[in-house]
Image (tube, rainbow, N blue to C red):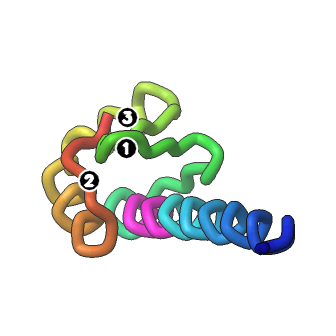
Amino acid sequence: MKGIGNLLDKFKSIAVQEINKRVFIVEIIKNKIGVDIKMEDISIKDGIVSIKVKSIVKNQIFIKKQALIKEISKKINIIDIN
């Protein structure tokens, strides 16, 4: 019988993977647009990256949306940025 430690390790692993994805997205946006975004402002669900930022930053993201999707897709399976 596996202990609770194994279960907690599984959840810890999932959390670390999620954080790594968000950090990667933050770095790509910083490199392409030159804007710092908080990791907490990014969520990923069903291949869609949602970013909660001011409208001026969101406009810059949408201007380079295809380039961002292409770059992020190299490591993370995404289909859209929202």
Q: Are marks 3 and 2 in contact (CB under 8 Å)?
A: no
Residue of label 1: 49
**Horizontally, is 4 left or right of 71 in the view?**
right
Q: Quadrant of residue 34?
A: bottom left
Magenta stretch, residue numbers: 24-30
Q: Nearer the viewer, mark 3 or mark 2?
A: 2
Q: Residues within 10 Å of mark 1 (few under 14, many from 20)?
A: some
**Picture coordinates of residue 43, whole percent (x, y):** 50, 42
The residue drawn where x is 20% and y is 47% is 79
**Horizontally, is 38 left or right of 63 in the view?**
right
Query: If the image is split into quadrants, where does the C terminus sit?
Result: top left
Residue of label 2: 78
Q: Quadrant of residue 2?
A: bottom right
Vertical order, 49 against 72 (above or below)? above
| Residue closer to the observer: 67 or 12 | 12
Q: CA distance from mark 1 to mark 2?
A: 7 Å
Residue ranking furthest to the right: 4
The residue drawn where x is 52% and y is 44% is 42
- Magenta stretch encompasses residue 66: no
Callout 1 secondary element: strand
Residue 76: which disc?
A: none
Q: CA distance from mark 3 to mark 2?
A: 18 Å
The residue drawn where x is 72% and y is 66% is 12
Q: Quadrant of residue 46?
A: top left
Callout 3 secondary element: helix
**Horizontally, is 63 left or right of 6 in the view?**
left
Residue of label 3: 58
